[in-house]
Image (cartoon, grey):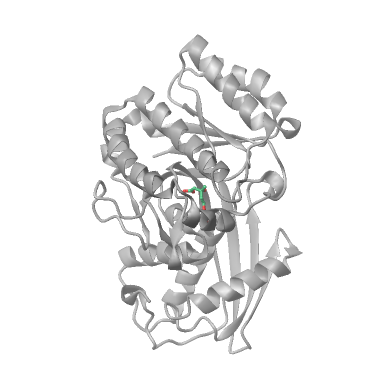
Amino acid sequence: MTQEFLGNSQFNISNQTVSARCPSNIALIKYWGKYENQIPANPSISYTLTHCKTNTTVHFLADEAFSVQTFLSGNEEKKFANKIEKYFQNIAPYLPWILKGRYVIETENTFPHSSGIASSASGFGALAKCLMSLDQIFSVENPPASIITQKASFLARLGSGSACRSLYEGLVVWGKTEEVEGSSNLFAVPYNNDAVHPIFRNFNDWVLLIHEGAKSVSSTVGHGLMNNNPYAKRRFREAHENFATLKTILSTGDMEGFIKLVEHEALTLHALMMMSEPPFILMQTATLQVINKIWEFRRIKGLALFFTLDAGANVHVLFPNDIDNKKITDFIQTELLPLTQNGAVVKDVIRF
Ligand code: PMV
């Protein structure tokens, strides 16, 4: 139990409707492997996206028997409701009123549901924000504003680890590292964005949708397989080392170093999957084709076009937004989009 976020036992509940929206995020240094209670095995850092968001409305019906009903884009999702019920039971020490009512939760993503883009980060981020809104209404004594976002991040983490980073804009760090003051395993903190070179503060992330539908191995199972992965220890150490390297890259504007590190992190994540027992592969043929084409383009044109991957087949194509990038966008259009499912791409941007 984390003492600092325990809820106030004095509260007054009433029927309420609250709404919140929260963006998704894409990790540059990846979180892969965890300990009990969603404690990350290594620190991670991500860009918070702009357009890929979840909008959530929570109807709380006070003094009715505890139950949860969830609707995704208007369609009832019973499996999701069971997951949320368990989640609410789990976080009850931090929100003591939470089991004292009935919930109807309506949620929708601004990106296609079947796209394979992880909706758990934006989903749990938006839900945690709604819960903190209710907490502010119900609690007799409210914590200071700075603590409210921190607690929302803490609660989001207990739903889905990477969700805790979606509560802040720009570059966001989760997991204790001596490179970032105030960093914590319990919640995310914003990176000191003033220390980031302007070249990294206006970036495109075009998500090429390679494979629609569910993944063959969930990230929960994937994290679990790190427990017996013989390379895990070395990997966790490397993530710490990469933080130190990235810090210098971010302050000096070293684009070459950035590309090298970000692509290395993405490939490491997938290499760890392949080295798990049992092994698994989430990349598809087209994932590798896109990567090879990006490398070839970079070799010939020398332009800053690169990629990262999350736990799936889709490719996040990254390139700075503040240069004339017509050559890059033309290349993506003609060479990369034909490798996606029906030309599907979600064009997002990071600006801070
Ligand atoms: O938050 P989870 O449990 O879905 O794990 C996400 C893990 C990665 O997306 C692969 C990496 C990360 O840091 O976001």
Residue at horizontal 61%, vertical 43%? 312
- Counting from the top left corner in percent of width and height, residue 50 is at 51, 43
Above or below, comparing residue 170 to residue 141 in the picture: above
Q: How many marks?
A: 0
Residue at horizontal 51%, vertical 67%? 130
Residue at horizontal 25%, vertical 46%? 179
Q: Quadrant of the C terminus?
A: top left
Residue 309 left/right relative to 232: right
Q: Looking at the picture, tell me which residue is in the foreground, 250 or 235.
A: 235
- Counting from the top left corner in percent of width and height, residue 185 is at 35, 60
Q: Looking at the picture, tell me which residue is in the foreground, 8 or 228.
A: 228
Above or below, comparing residue 182 to residue 143 in the picture: above
Q: Quadrant of the N terminus?
A: bottom left
- Counting from the top left corner in percent of width and height, residue 27 is at 46, 44
The quarter of the picture where residue 41 lies is bottom left
Residue lying at the far top of the rendered structure: 300
Residue 127 left/right relative to 201: right
Residue at horizontal 65%, vertical 56%? 108
Above or below, comparing residue 233 to residue 267 in the picture: below
- Counting from the top left corner in percent of width and height, residue 254 is at 32, 25
Q: Looking at the picture, tell me which residue is in the foreground, 240 or 310.
A: 240
Q: Looking at the picture, tell me which residue is in the foreground, 281 or 19.
A: 281
Residue 164 left/right relative to 290: left
Question: Can residue 296 be seen?
Answer: yes
The quarter of the picture where residue 280 lies is top right
